[in-house]
Image (cartoon, grey):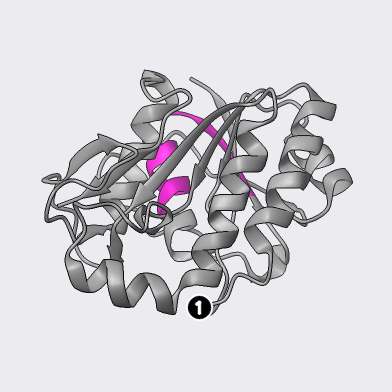
Amino acid sequence: MSNVIVFGANGRSGRLIVREALNLGHDVTAAVREPARWQPPTAEGTPGQGKPNVVRADVRDADSVRSAVEGHDIVISAIGPSGRHAHRLYSDAARALVSGMEGAGVTRLIAITSGGVHHRDPNFPWWYRNLVSSLARELYDDMRLMEAIVRESGVDWTFVRPARLQDEPPTDNYRVLDASNPKGGRKVTRTDLARFIARELDEHRWSHAAPTLAE
């Protein structure tokens, strides 16, 4: 079992990742900006091995990241902006994560971006390639920059690229391709995403790859 830290742990996907990693017996730290606002994940399925530690961390600040990740085996980034614009969140976080992880001697990163990063993927419906990708261009551009920054580092990276995320019960019926959207796939549930990431902690099948998830 691994010692895992989750940035963005108070988000909708982050809380589920914390829960699923605990359920698989990992030691989990939730890294959040405001620990007083931490919302523990709702229990579901097999009881986990305990509760997460909660630490204050600023994912845009390399010193803060370094302090938070010290002693962990794997870093998970489940960060995301509150709206449709990134405001450099992903690229700023990438620089801080790389610097902080290298300073602390932590080598493995699993980060959530989006299937939209490959916005001209022919497996997307035409309306997505021509409409949605344009509306979210600034967001996807910053995700692409995040990926580029991490790839140029010595970090052992995995970029998990989900299709449109759904707050619905898990289906366990999604498909996965490396760096390409499964043909016709439009959505995936957040719990399926969280379970995929939690399994990858042990399986380590997708090193230096971009598993793209869609039903």
Seen in the picture, residue 128 relative to 188 is either above or below; the reply is below
User: Can you identify the residue that label 1 sits on?
Assistant: 84
Please identify the quarter of the rendering in which residue 164 is found.
bottom left
Q: Magenta region: which residues?
A: 16-30
Let me know if residue 18 is in the magenta part.
yes
CA neighbours of label 1 inside 10 A, class few (<14), some (14 to 19), many (20+): few
Let me know if residue 113 is in the magenta part.
no
Q: Is residue 198 visible?
A: yes
Decide if residue 72 is on the left or right side of residue 110: right
Q: Is residue 9 visible?
A: no
The picture places residue 41, in percent across and down from the top left corner, at: 44, 58
The picture places residue 107, in percent across and down from the top left corner, at: 66, 23
Residue drawn at x 55%, y 55% as measured from the top left = 143
* Closer to us: 46 or 194: 194
Residue drawn at x 24%, y 36% as measured from the top left = 177
Seen in the picture, residue 45 relative to 198 is either above or below; the reply is below
